[in-house]
Amino acid sequence: MADKSHWEKVYSTRAIDDVSWYQTHAERSLKLIRELGIAKDAPIIDVGGGASVLVGDLLDNGYSNLAVLDLSAAALCAARARLGGHVIVATFAEDGPTECSGLPVMRYDAAHLHGEFGAPFELLGHERETHLTPAGRTQSFLYCFCRRQPH
Ligand SMILES: C[S@@+](CC[C@H](N)C(=O)[O-])C[C@H]1O[C@@H](n2cnc3c(N)ncnc32)[C@H](O)[C@@H]1O
């Protein structure tokens, strides 16, 4: 498809901030979305969004239900790499309770929990927490924080 090869070439050969449509922030789009009173959890799709900053600006302003549609995989990769995709997940640690509300649960150490996310995610670190329940019992929790690796 000629259009697709054109846009793939653009995004593969030029720096993101070296194209004529580059802007540091998508001020006007953001202003119009704000003025229209669109709810922060309303679905918003940026059609032809490329590697643009609009989605990052929307995330920074509390909008949460976002999608970008673009012909160019290279553009979408650049946007993903810029946005990061951090994950913070907490669960019962390997010495935590065996049940929650009467149901059996999985318990994890850091390597096992990181493994659930797979190779695209780098484990940045983990922390343990001893939670004191209202009934005065203690429960071991594990927090892992991972970052999606750029493509
Ligand atoms: C001039 S760029 C603008 C990108 C972005 N909106 C911005 O402001 O940085 C045009 C974008 O439209 C995308 N595009 C062109 N034709 C498309 C199509 N048929 N469907 C989806 N995206 C398309 C291109 O890949 C490119 O990212």
Image: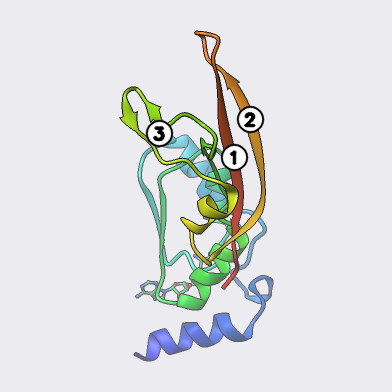
Precedes in sequence: disc 1 or disc 2: 2
In the image, residue 117 above or below residue 72:
above
Residue at the spot 61% in from the left edge and 47% down from the top edge:
145
Say which amino acid is labelled 3.
Answer: Ala
Residue 103 placed where, x, y %? 31, 29
Name the residue that disc number 3 marks: 39
- Secondary structure under tag 3 reads loop
Name the residue that disc number 2 marks: 129
- Secondary structure under tag 1 reads strand
**Quadrant of the image occupied by residue 48:** bottom left
- Ligand 1 shows up in the quarter that is bottom left
Residue 147 placed where, x, y %? 61, 56
The label on residue 52 is none
* Crowd band around label 3 with a 10 angstrom C-alpha radius: few (<14), some (14–19), many (20+): some
Q: Are marks 1 and 2 in contact (CB under 8 Å)?
A: yes
Query: Marks 1 and 3: which is nearer the front?
Result: 1
Q: CA distance from mark 1 to mark 3?
A: 31 Å
Q: Residue furthest top?
A: 135
Query: Marks 3 and 2: which is nearer the front?
Result: 2
